[in-house]
């Protein structure tokens, strides 16, 4: 019988300390049939590591509550922050097999290759961000597996575990599905097969694989830092006609007549969305002082507050900076039937972070594809995603800035940062145009809203939301 090599165990612990100090997030996945040895290998690894920055997450068959959230939501929620290690006992792969085997969300996922595509995009995005994903496929001699199950059944204290095995996806189905999934995803992050028939050898094989993976992760991190470039890649004397239409007519009388009617319709549609379990996500971006807050206020003024939330996004906190930049948004996605409003959003990566040099060139350039994939996953799950970009001209912005500065009850709305941003007007315009052109897709198009007239901008937003909801609910258009 092979003994567990303590030098390997110590080496793993030391390397995990180094990846912690280097801020490298590590994800270790254990897949395999029931009673293959996943829990024992998981525990061996957990015992070898410092509990302060080690976490464990076990995937289970989704409950009715789980199914009200997107497919990858549990893994966004349980993502390790930079420098931490999360061990996944079963993962998004087992989750996909659960969806397919139990025919979950059939009205959405008739083709389960959609979920495989999401998995591939998720892993690639994390790897590009410096995550290390170590995937183990645990196998075992079938005779030994059956012996283990029988022992579990015969012990009154572990009989409950055997009952769980019986509820698991049949081994033959799981193995066939995993064989396909491993072949499809081996080029993104490789799979490592561990045979648990002989415990000591299995543990040593696991340690040796983790050592190689973490040593490579440390080398990759250094190489990436050496090549890091921070450049917004802006054009001298940039010009665009994309934001020239800043005016939209709306009289005070028309506004007073239209607003309550549209707000009442919004409330009715909120209940219709809830009844049909359709989530809606409203994104507001635009120039400073364009009236995003006032626009959002009119949208939600008549809504039932139990069915929506507003996320006013500011600079990321220290905690938020320790995760992938999409983490703080992916964990705030609404459950089915609810509305989430973002006052500024994930587009900060390609706007303020690009302009101010907070993101490297490589980070903001790859963000367009990451954002498109993120929004695609939301709409595939049935969400309505509406993105507004409010535009006003430079003279109108100056007028509003001065009004805020000279009105005591509005002074809290104006900051030194607003004035600094105004000095970078042209490069913000270029970043905004790039953003709109590269992320306006059929599933989640941008709606450019002329905002010199606040009243007209509010009516346009309300009409747009109503039209998109009615079209989704009943296939009709009014505006």
Image (cartoon, rainbow, N blue to C red):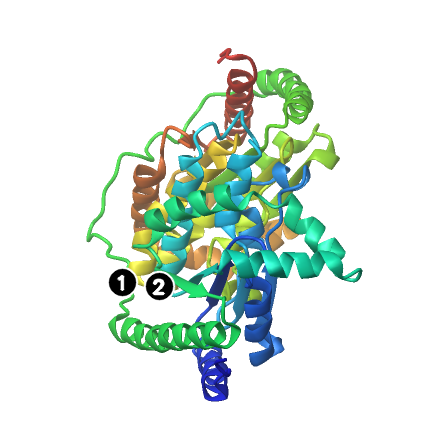
Residue 347 relative to residue 437: left or right: right
Q: Is residue 203 visible?
A: yes
Q: Residue at horizontal 50%, vertical 12%? A: 475
Q: Is residue 62 above or below residue 266?
A: below
Q: Quadrant of residue 240?
A: top left
Q: Give 105 or 429, whichever is nearer the viewer.
A: 105
Q: Position of residue 283 (x, y in %)?
A: 51, 39
Secondary structure type for disc 2 = loop
Q: Residue at horizontal 44%, vertical 43%? A: 177
Q: Give 35 or 272, whichever is nearer the viewer.
A: 35
Total numbered badges shown on the rendered structure: 2
Q: Is residue 215 above or below residue 387?
A: below
* Marks 1 and 2 in Cβ contact (< 8 Å): yes
**How many C-alpha atoms fall within 10 Å of the one at disc 1: few (<14), some, or many (≥20)?**
some
Residue ID for mark 1: 231
Q: Give 191 or 122, whichever is nearer the viewer.
A: 191
Secondary structure type for disc 1 = loop
Mark 1 or mark 2, earlier in chain: 1
Q: Which mark is residue 357?
A: 2
Q: Position of residue 200 (x, y in %)?
A: 50, 77
């Amino acid at each position: 019988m092979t003994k567990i090599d303590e030098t390997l165990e110590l080496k793993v612990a030391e390397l995990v300390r180094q990846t912690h100090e280097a801020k490298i997030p590590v994800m270790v996945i254990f897949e395999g049939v029931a009673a293959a040895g996943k829990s024992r290998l998981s525990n061996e690894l957990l015992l070898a590591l410092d509990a302060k920055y080690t976490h464990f997450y076990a995937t289970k068959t989704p409950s009715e509550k789980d199914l009200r959230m997107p497919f990858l939501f549990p893994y966004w929620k349980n993502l390790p922050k930079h420098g931490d290690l999360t061990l996944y006992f079963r993962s998004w792969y087992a989750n996909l097999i659960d969806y397919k085997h139990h025919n979950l969300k059939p009205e959405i996922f008739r083709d389960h290759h959609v979920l495989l595509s999401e998995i591939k995009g998720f892993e690639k995005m994390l790897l590009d961000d410096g995550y290390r994903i170590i995937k183990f496929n645990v196998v075992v001699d079938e005779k030994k597996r059956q012996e283990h199950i029988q022992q579990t059944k015969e012990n009154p204290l572990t009989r409950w575990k055997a009952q769980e095995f019986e509820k698991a996806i049949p081994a033959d189905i799981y193995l066939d599905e995993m064989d396909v999934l491993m072949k499809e995803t081996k080029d993104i992050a490789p799979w490592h097969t561990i045979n648990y028939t002989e415990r000591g050898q299995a543990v040593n094989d696991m340690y040796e694989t983790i050592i190689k993976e973490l040593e490579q992760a440390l080398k990759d991190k250094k190489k990436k830092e050496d090549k890091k470039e921070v450049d917004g890649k802006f054009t001298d004397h940039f010009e665009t006609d994309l934001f020239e239409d800043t005016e939209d007519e709306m009289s005070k009388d028309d506004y007073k007549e239209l607003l309550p009617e549209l707000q009442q319709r919004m409330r009715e549609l909120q209940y219709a969305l809830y009844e049909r379990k359709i989530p809606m996500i409203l994104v507001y971006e635009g120039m400073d002082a364009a009236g995003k807050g006032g626009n959002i206020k009119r949208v939600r003024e008549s809504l039932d507050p139990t069915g929506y939330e507003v996320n006013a996004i500011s600079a990321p906190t220290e905690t938020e900076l320790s995760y992938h930049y999409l983490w703080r948004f992916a964990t705030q996605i609404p459950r089915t039937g609810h509305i989430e409003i973002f006052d500024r959003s994930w587009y900060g990566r390609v706007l303020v972070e690009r302009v101010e040099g907070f993101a490297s060139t490589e980070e903001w350039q790859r963000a367009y594809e990451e954002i498109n994939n993120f929004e695609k996953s939301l709409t595939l799950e049935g969400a309505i995603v509406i993105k507004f970009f409010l535009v006003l001209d430079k003279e109108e912005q100056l007028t509003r800035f001065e009004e805020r500065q000279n009105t005591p009850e509005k002074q809290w709305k104006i900051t030194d940062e607003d004035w600094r941003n105004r000095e970078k007007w042209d490069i913000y315009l270029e970043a905004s145009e790039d953003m709109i052109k590269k992320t306006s897709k059929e599933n989640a198009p941008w709606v450019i809203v002329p905002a010199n007239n606040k009243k007209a901008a509010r009516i346009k937003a309300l009409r747009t939301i109503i039209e998109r909801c009615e079209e989704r609910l009943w296939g009709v258009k009014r505006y």
